[in-house]
Image (tube, coloured by chain):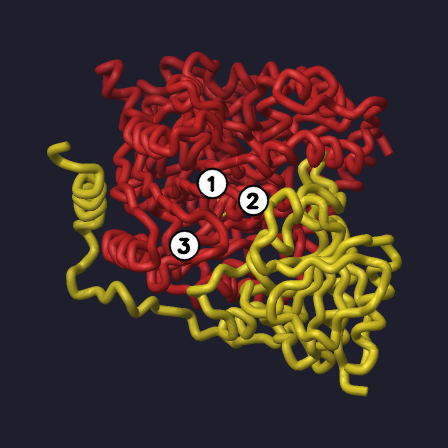
Chain colours: A red, B yellow
Amino acid sequence: MSGADNVVWLGTPAFPEAARTALADPQLRANLRRATGTIRDRRLAVAAELEDWEELRERAATIKHHTLRHLDHHLLRLEKAVTAAGGVVHWAADAAEANRIVTRLVEATGESEVVKVKSMATQEIGLNEALADAGIRAYETDLAELIVQLGGDRPSHILVPAIHRNRFEIREIFQREMGEWGAPAPEGLTAEPRDLAEAARLHLRERFLRAKVAVSGANFATADTGTVVVVESEGNGRMCLTLPETLITVMGIEKVLPSFADLDVFLQLLPRSSTGERMNPYTSLWTGVTEGDGPRNFHLVLLDNGRTATLADEVGRQALACIRCSACLNVCPVYERTGGHAYGSVYPGPIGAVLTPQLVGVEHAASLPFASTLCGACYDACPVKINIPEVLVHLRAEAVEAERRDRLFPTPEALVMKALGAVLGSPRRLAAVQRLAAGASRLVARDGRIGALPGPFARWSATRDTPAPARESLRAWWRRTRTPTSEDIRTKAEGK
Amino acid sequence: MTMNGRETVLDAIRGALSGVPGSESPDATPLSHGRRVDHAGPDVVGMFADRAAEYRATVVRVPPADVAEAVGRALARTGARSLVVPPGFPEGLVPEGPWSRLADVPPLSIGQLDEADAVITTVATAIAVTGTVTLDHGPGQGRRVLTLLPDQHICVVRADQIAPDVPEALRLLDPYRPLTLVSGPSATSDIELDRVEGVHGPRTLDIVVVVDA
Ligand code: SF4
């Protein structure tokens, strides 16, 4: 798949090297540990309030999977409903086409600036850069996106792109950059989150009030009514969705839901999984255009950009059910230590490790499926029950296969990886095999290394020594040492 | 354009889904018929008030005769000097006081709304479990911008408008109207994933729940 602009940041090192750099940055690790620890505890508390949480997850997964199996049907229904309500629907096969459509729509308004609501889809296609090339300036309005934009930085988390920055760094960025972009930071700005939020309010106010064009993403769109949903906290979304004359929404084709009634499950699951709130402060729903209220022109751009290639893979397809809550990032032991930049993609963390290689083709992000311990925490946390470990293992086999094709020498690694797939796909089977392997392999290992192996493994083991499996698997170690609260972990890490 | 984006995307989807049997119905989503659990309990009004307050809305419960007075107290607390009253808002609920009154007829400009201190509205429905008020921007609520730019939003919620949970509330809403679900004042979790209130939307949310005397 080509045309993916920002899914993979070209020129960034593969995960292992990038992770090594990140791990050496104590500030980054402290920022991440603090932030993900806070959110993990809150998510667990609000999920536990709903005793049918598991049923809700099951229903959400069922709706998503069934919708994906009939995606063309539901998209056509959506198109019809949006059009009937006065909106205009556009289809974009790849990033370049989506960027062309949006650029043309903005140019038609005669405006040279747009305000933006946080949107993964427009990040993915590199819309801001494409607009800049056409002389159009895009202003991010979500607080974390603003921090990233002002800091000339890259996003590192799908919900809170500036999670790698702490309050002091944010103050520094505001003081240094706000004046360059518009209203400068207030005199004597402190690093109190309340003051930083106030500074963002002041900085963006004028911009909202004079904006004529807004670009947004979408969390959901319902095919029966043509309703589009944006879930947010700050009110910057409401500003962008309400004040401008023209609204352009860029939405991945996988976001469609069959009916308005389906929103009930997702509006219960998403806020709890994402910010750990029972409900986020603001959810906006609109259907086409409304006379005398809000934008007079509404455009919905439906984006493929690698999604249909993902859809074609019956195992990998489930990654398209993702509602971008970010729970899998917040619980991931690898993400917590490396941060998002190491993944080299706008989609970091466990979901990135399965989505990015599929969107761009596994050969272009071959290290990502390996950026995981397969501990399964992401699967447990995922509100739509995406079996991320299963997809990871499936993609590992593909990455190995792709490498084999590349190098044109036969290796049984692909086979081994496929066989592992069956084992690793099931946490219980995995645990059993790991216990077995830890015992058995010690019989063939010398000095803690496994040398030459018999049979089909001979050629594989000829080129590498495999460390003997530890007495205890990382999974088991994680489960044993990973106590329920982040506080315990901190206490442990600091030597009590 | 020859082969347009629409046909390209639809063809690609159909190609990707060639394994799905043609006999499978696209509409009948096979839902798991799990139990529907009541998350609200018997005291729906009490739960709504508690949950809304947890997200830093200021909630009071008053009998019908005292609504205007409660609204007046909320305005006095913030020292509001101007109040937007949307078309269709019940006249009897608007308090007298030292604030100027702005009607949205003819429509107020963005500048006027930006300078207004407060707005008062009714709601379409409310949700107990999440402490949410829902606006459909009909009579008594006004167009969306009215509840966005003034820094204080006061809403009057009748006890019988409070739905126990999200599914019940959604069933009461008209999807063809613009809808806004509001749960507490504007907030952000973007700094160290900790929640602070008060960003772009109204920084003060007052909810007056009208209960039978
Ligand atoms: S994969 Fe699941 S947990 Fe991760 S962001 Fe998507 S929906 Fe959330």
On the picture, is A119 further left or further right than B50? Answer: left
Residue that badge 3 annotates? A289
**Quarter occupied by the N terminus of chain A:** top left
User: Do tags 2 and 3 sit on the same chain?
Assistant: yes
Q: In the rendered view, does A354 fall on the left or right side of B145?
A: left
Out of A360 and A379, give the one closest to the viewer. A360
Q: Earlier in the sequence, mark 1 or mark 2?
A: 1
The answer as to whether callout 2 falls within 8 Å of ligand 1 is no
Q: Quadrant of residue B139?
A: bottom right
Q: Identify the mark nearer the N-term, 2 or 3.
A: 2
Q: Amino acid at mark 1?
A: Ser
In the rendered image, residue A127, in percent from the top left (x then y), is placed at 41, 27
The three-letter code of the residue at mark 2 reads Gly
Q: Is residue B117 left or right of residue B173?
A: right
**Label 2 element class:** helix
User: Can residue A64 be seen at all in this image of the molecule?
Assistant: no
Q: Which residue type does callout 3 highlight?
A: Val
Q: Are marks 3 and 1 in contact (CB under 8 Å)?
A: no
Q: What numbered label is drawn on residue A237?
A: 2
Nearest to N terminus: mark 3 or mark 1: 1
Name which quarter of the figure residue A202 lies in: top right
Please tell me whether mark 1 sits on a helix, a strand or a loop: strand
Q: Nearer the viewer, residue A488 or A164?
A: A164
